[in-house]
Image: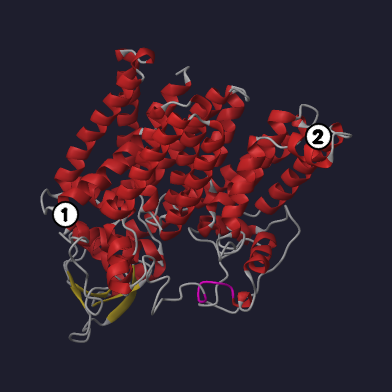
Amino acid sequence: MKRFKDYIFLGINSYILYGTILLLFSLSRIFNILSLRDVFIISVICSYLVKFLLYKKEGREFSIKAVIFIEAAYLALFVIIVAGASFFYDTTYDGRSYHQEGIILLADGYNPFYEQLNEDKVLHSLWINHYPKAAEIVSATLYSVTGNIETGKAFHVLLIFSNILMGMGLFLRWGKLSFFTGAIFSLILALNPVAVCQSLTYYVDGQQWSLLLAASYLMFLYILEKKQAWNLMLAWVIIPLVNIKFTALIYAVMTAGIYGFFLLLTATKKEFRKTLTIIGVSFAIAVFCVGFNPYVTNTLIKGHPFYPIYGENKVDIITGNAPDEFKGKNRFQKFYLSFLGRTGNVMSWWSDEKIVLKIPFTFDRDEIKALSGCDTRVAGFGPFFSGICLVSAFIYLLHKLGRFKKSAGTGRLRQMLNSVNLMDVILFCVAASVVINPEPWWARYVPQVWAIPVLMILSVMIADNKRKGLTLVPVSLFGVSVLLTVFVYIGSNMADTSVLNHELALLSERNETIEVYFENFRSDRLKLIKKGIAYREVTGGPEPTGEYENTLLGHGTLWHNDKSLHDALNRLN
């Protein structure tokens, strides 16, 4: 693939499919028609129709052979990634609790447009009722086709690969970097640790990052080319972005506002009006149709669109999740401690462990192990990130001082304006989006922090040949950090999956009906059912009668009467 559009049209497939599933699901649930399996199959067909229209719009540049190659390549990528996702178990707390339970309920017929789950009877219904559901909806449709709930995680990885491809296309079109350098930056941006470390789970912060990155790429493409095809693609990204998390809606509005302001200054009136119409309609559909639950239902029932995080009787999800020493500190103090601390999952619910500050680039074995976590609280971008930021900032400041001196004698304001490029404007906007978040210390709440040193490096590379060579240092460190995160995370999940498979194999070999308490992970029942393991759930009924007790799948409890099984499970755990 030599043309930049080949990469964009290949990468955008995941986002068109994602947005189409959400739209069709919403319409089908409003009118109570179609099964989830039907929704998925029809969405695939509709996605190809959307792509056909986009190809037609850019028809001069795509031969039939090129179109067949692009779509066949995506189909192969989709099948491989779905198959790979089915191999790994989601072993995380949120993933196995309310995310998977929500997927199961949707697959079983739960209609969020007309139903509110009974919070006294349905486990995790507070979160299922009131949180955005984009990830759960698309995962439920795929689960309805494959019969394996783990396959729904594939959308995480699909979006990562899509962003690698779209990034390569954008940098190729931009023309200020070589193809190889653009590919490196595409990999660095797409493989944000928040995205990587949630790619085999049902957490949604990684998808939020992928969606924000894709939206940014398409906005940049439109600024470069002023072709409405990029805005039409952007509309398909906005629909899932707004419905992935509450914070995503805020980030989306802020990003769209900056985009609109920039176009107001640079685009023609016709271009601006068309863009405003497309973006406005996509936001309206995203909030009032696809996002009817939760944004409209929350407002009508609870008085605030972001309930239960805001509004009357809001739930505090931060205090227990945060390190104990964050109490009484403002967002900037918390960010400082997290940024310069040792990578780890320090939280007051578990212990009164203190954050240990460290010298940048130093690390130990525990910090490397922490890269396997999906929601690391302190230094969540990895043990090298603070050093990468400081080195990037140093080079960036050298560059700015050099540009400032070159403009000497032209007036201080003119000097400042002469030293600014587009990367600097984007950098300022990204930094502002971090500052507005009340909890910027937690990496998964502000995944865009990862882009800040990248933008500093790009600013230097495109405008300062004298210091361009210095950027090789932070870029190389980024490469080491990304590779380490990928290998540690995948290796850890392979090990966890192997242990669970071994445990399930041991249980399936017995003819005895086991007694189980799933704790907060009732979705684990699907694992037992799939393996043909007979069980009786212990929840407020008769007390367990089994003689021996073991941990069930890492969290729950099981009772049985087989001593050899008891000993085997103890050795395994």
Q: Is residue 334 above or below residue 443?
A: below
Residue 461 at x, y percent in the picture: 70, 31
Bounds of the magenta span? 319-323
Q: Nearer the viewer, residue 326 or 154?
A: 326
Please identify the residue farthest to the left as the structure is shown: 33
Colouring rule applied to residues: secondary structure
Say whether marks 1 and 2 touch (CB < 8 Å): no
Amino acid type, callout 2: Arg
Query: Which quadrant holds the N terminus?
Result: top left
CA gap, disc 1 to disc 2?
A: 58 Å
For image coordinates 20% across by 33% down, the residue present is: 45
Tell me which corner region of the image, top left, top right, bottom left or bottom right, holds residue 475: top right
Please identify the residue farthest to the front as the structure is shown: 269
SS majority, magenta: loop
For image coordinates 58% across by 46% down, the residue present is: 484
Horizontally, residue 323 falls left or right of residue 72, namely: right
For image coordinates 42% across by 49% down, the residue present is: 207
Residue 542 at x, y percent in the picture: 18, 86
Can residue 134 be seen at all in this image of the molecule? yes
Amino acid type, callout 1: Ile
Disc 1, SS: helix
Q: Which mark is residue 403?
A: 2
Can residue 399 be seen at all in this image of the molecule? no
Please identify the residue farthest to the bottom as the structure is shown: 543
Residue 200 at x, y percent in the picture: 40, 51
Comes first in the chain, label 1 or label 2: 1
Q: Is residue 54 above or below residue 471?
A: above
Tell me which corner region of the image, top left, top right, bottom left or bottom right, holds residue 504: bottom left
Residue 445: in magenta span:
no
Residue under pointer 1: 30
Q: Is residue 158 above or below residue 90?
A: above
